[in-house]
Image (cartoon, rainbow, N blue to C red):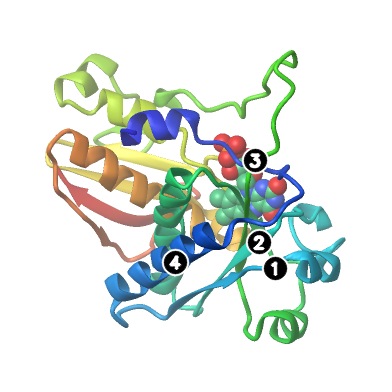
Amino acid sequence: MSMSSFLLNRESTREFKNKSIKEGILDLVENAILDLRSENDGRYNVDFKLIKNGSNLYEELKNVGGYAGVMIESPSYIALSAKEDVKDQLYAAYSMEKLISKLNGLNLGSCWVSLAGVPADVKEKLLGSDVDFLLAIGEKKLKNPFLREVFSERKEIKEIVYAEEFGKEIDLDELEGKGLLDLFYYIRFAPSTKNLQPWRFVVSNKKVVLYLDKEVVETYGVADAGIVMYYFEELAKMINLNTEWSLLGFEEKNGYIEVAEIEL
Ligand SMILES: Cc1cc2nc3c(=O)[nH]c(=O)nc-3n(C[C@H](O)[C@H](O)[C@H](O)COP(=O)(O)O)c2cc1C
């Protein structure tokens, strides 16, 4: 499946079939984690751990894990820990989303689970480290075909993309002329904490600068930026742009933090 159709159809799964993931599939998940580890090659302080049997963990985290203690119940989980360093945090989220694209190929549904409300010592006891996020994984519960789907709304391109400088309206024809209209159409479907879509992009001739809402960074960290950076690079490959983000100084401008830039 192309990255654009994957993003259009990508959604968080919060209801799973009440059955374990097959051993053969779990082995493939384990392999995907090993691949991430070797790609990282020790550059970033990030770790993934597969928890095959998630029932105990669910019981322990019920009422504390997830948004406002709404823990997501799934047969298995993947625990993601990263050091405080912002580079590690960004890379962790970037790699987790890469892993999610692979899980989709294995027909597994997934949902990020925030653990900000769980005390560090509880996480140490349950998971062996101060885990930042869990990914709930499993087979998606079948939906009632007669019920209308509720999709998470997305902002318009003009709400998140600016021209030349922060806040300056972008002309969509111009964006199309640069070959970037489709990329920004699809990037909006990236997941984000509470669907806040806190990313802003400033497009100029030679580069795109990524900003993240300061309040989101202060409250939830930089995971949403790492995720969108992953999808941007993947969508760019579809228009033959092999380009990578470089981190900026995290200065604040207009209530947004300047995170990274990418050459076009
Ligand atoms: C970093 C991160 C943390 C999240 N934490 C939770 C969570 O704790 N509970 C939950 O139900 N959804 C969680 N989500 C899922 C988002 O709410 C979801 O991605 C967003 O609402 C968009 O919906 P969609 O993924 O279905 O497109 C999280 C997403 C991200 C990116």
The amino acid type found where label 3 is placed reads Lys
Q: Amino acid at mark 1?
A: Asn
- Label 3, on which residue? 140
Quarter where residue 219 is shown: bottom right
Q: Residue at x 54, y 59 (%)?
A: 217
**On screen, residue 163 above or below 246:** above
Q: Are marks 1 and 2 in contact (CB under 8 Å)?
A: yes
Q: Residue 204 at what x, y percent from top left?
A: 19, 37
Mark nearest the camera among 2 and 4 is 2
Q: Which residue is mark 4?
A: 92
The residue depicted at 77 percent of the width and 81 percent of the height is 122
Mark 3 and mark 2: Cα distance apart in space:
12 Å
What distance separates the C-alpha of mark 2 from that of mark 4?
A: 19 Å
What's the residue type where badge 2 is placed? Answer: Ser
Marked residue nearer the N-terminal end (3 or 2): 2
Of the numbered discs 3 and 4, the one sitting upstream in the chain is: 4
